[in-house]
Image (cartoon, rainbow, N blue to C red):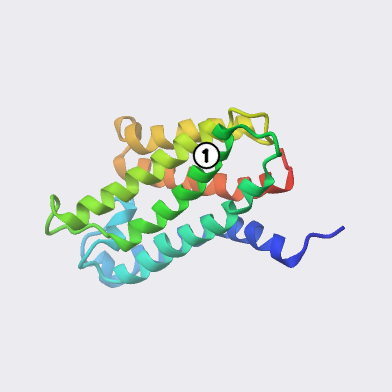
Amino acid sequence: MPPSPSSRWPVFAGRAALPVFAAVALVCGALPAVRATGFMQSSHPVSWLGATGMPASTWFNALGFGLCGLLAAIALWPLRASLPAPARWTARIGTQALWLSALAFAAQGAWPLDPRAPDGLATGLHGIAWTAWWLAFGVGGVLRATMSVPGRGVTAGAAVLVPAVAVAGGLVLPAALAERLAFGLWLAWIGWGTRLSRGGA
């Protein structure tokens, strides 16, 4: 029986999240007005594109963080319903935390960095959203993997790798690359994870 149109939306959303984020980051970073500020993909965090005062920051925050976070949330929404009836509470809480990581990712766009006040409220809120993103994903992935559900190995691995790269990747990689790698790994897992609600391995 072919999947219903409603069941195809999470799959489409999950697979679109990574290419949309990459395209928005590349286009915004290539704008002449942005390049005139000295922004370089190789040395500046991608979050800088959404910083207060940056050209096209509203577009990056709305599409890069906001839209991609929404796509991830749509993709992850069916996971809870896909759990078997006897699923442990840890797996249920973990699945909910995975979904919350998508909301935290989107929140980074609602609370952009403020380069003029690195210790100010706006920058602090952005940092909280960033921390909530990787923390919710890390905890959620590990908890979901406590039960024998499809893809538990890949999910547990991603749940460890993404926070590790986000927090400590700058020790072995340029900080700008570490941030992009962490976001990319998470979004890649989102695209892969759309199979889990359909019983994929």
Q: Is residue 138 visible?
A: yes
Which residue is labeled 1 in the image?
A: 93
Total number of numbered discs in the rendering: 1
Residue 67 or residue 184, whichever sits in front: 67
Give the image quarter of residue 31: bottom left
Q: Is residue 43 visible?
A: no
Above or below residue 94? Residue 103 is: below
Above or below residue 63? Residue 192 is: above
The residue positioned 53% from the left and 32% from the top of the image is: 143
Residue 93 or residue 172, whichever sits in front: 93
Residue 50, image x, y percentages: 30, 62
Residue 71, image x, y percentages: 53, 60
Q: On the picture, is 196 further left or further right than 169?
A: right
The residue positioned 45% from the left and 47% from the top of the image is: 101
Residue 96, image x, y percentages: 52, 45
In the picture, the quarter occupied by the N terminus is bottom right
